[in-house]
Image (spheres, helix red, strand yellow):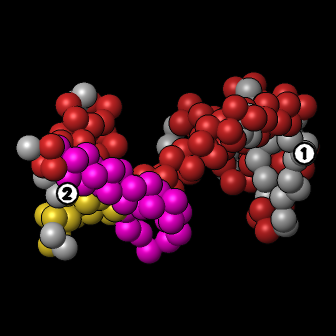
Amino acid sequence: MDDLEKVETIRTKCNVSYTDAKAALDAVNGNVLDAIIWLESQGKTQTTSAHAATEPESVDEPSAEMVAAQAAYEKSSEKTDFSKKMDSVWEYLKKLFRLSLDTKFIATRRDAIILNIPILIPIVALFAWGATIWLMLIGLFFGMRYRIDSDGDVPGSINNLMDHAADAADGIKQNLNDDK
């Protein structure tokens, strides 16, 4: 190994200038290892010794900028009042949708079930197609009866109201037949 390679090795290992590496090499008669040790004893090297490497490193405290950035991130990650309200609205809508699928709309004629579908379908049909209400009214005159059935609580007044509508349609039909 020539002098330039030795100086380069010492310089890279000890993180010193070429001048310091050459002076160390000259001080120990050209031995690279002795030159590194000589630089360490002079306090010119920035390498860690084997003893220092086995000691636990001290953990630096985060900088003020790092603490501020972490706080800003955590603040941006928190849910706002609007997002909390939207979450509760979505939860309510999911619950309502599940209930509308569990609740059944049942149409019968002469005690035989003609139609048994989730209540969501007639509700959507009422808004999407205006003739739905007219078809249900006409169905009353042909002996159809409607009711809502669910595992949960269905107010009896709804089914009573539909029974009264069916009875009224039967009464009108009977009056028309009597007039003939």
Q: Quadrant of residue 116?
A: bottom left
Q: Which residue is mark 1?
A: 61
Question: What's drawn in magenta, residue-wise?
Answer: 148-176
Q: Nearer the viewer, mark 1 or mark 2?
A: 2
Question: Compared to 122, does 52 lie above or below?
Answer: below
Question: Compared to 75, does 87 lie above or below?
Answer: below
Main secondary-structure element of the magenta-colored stretch: helix
Q: Which residue is mark 2?
A: 144
Residue 113 is left or right of residue 121, and the answer is: left
x then y, percent, for residue 109: 16, 64
Query: Regarding mark 1 in the picture, which secondary structure is present there?
Result: loop
Q: Nearer the viewer, residue 140 or 82?
A: 140
x then y, percent, for residue 2: 52, 37
Looking at numbered disc 1 in the image, what kind of residue is underneath it?
A: Glu
Q: Quadrant of residue 75?
A: top right
Residue 168 within the magenta-colored segment of the rendering:
yes
The C terminus lies in which quarter of the figure?
top left
At horizontal 84% and vertical 58% (from top left) the residue drawn is 57
Decide: few, some or many residues near mark 2? Use Cα within 10 Å; few <14, some 14-19, many ≥20: many
Q: Nearer the viewer, residue 96 or 22?
A: 96
At horizontal 32% and vertical 31% (from top left) the residue drawn is 127
Q: CA distance from mark 1 to mark 2?
A: 79 Å
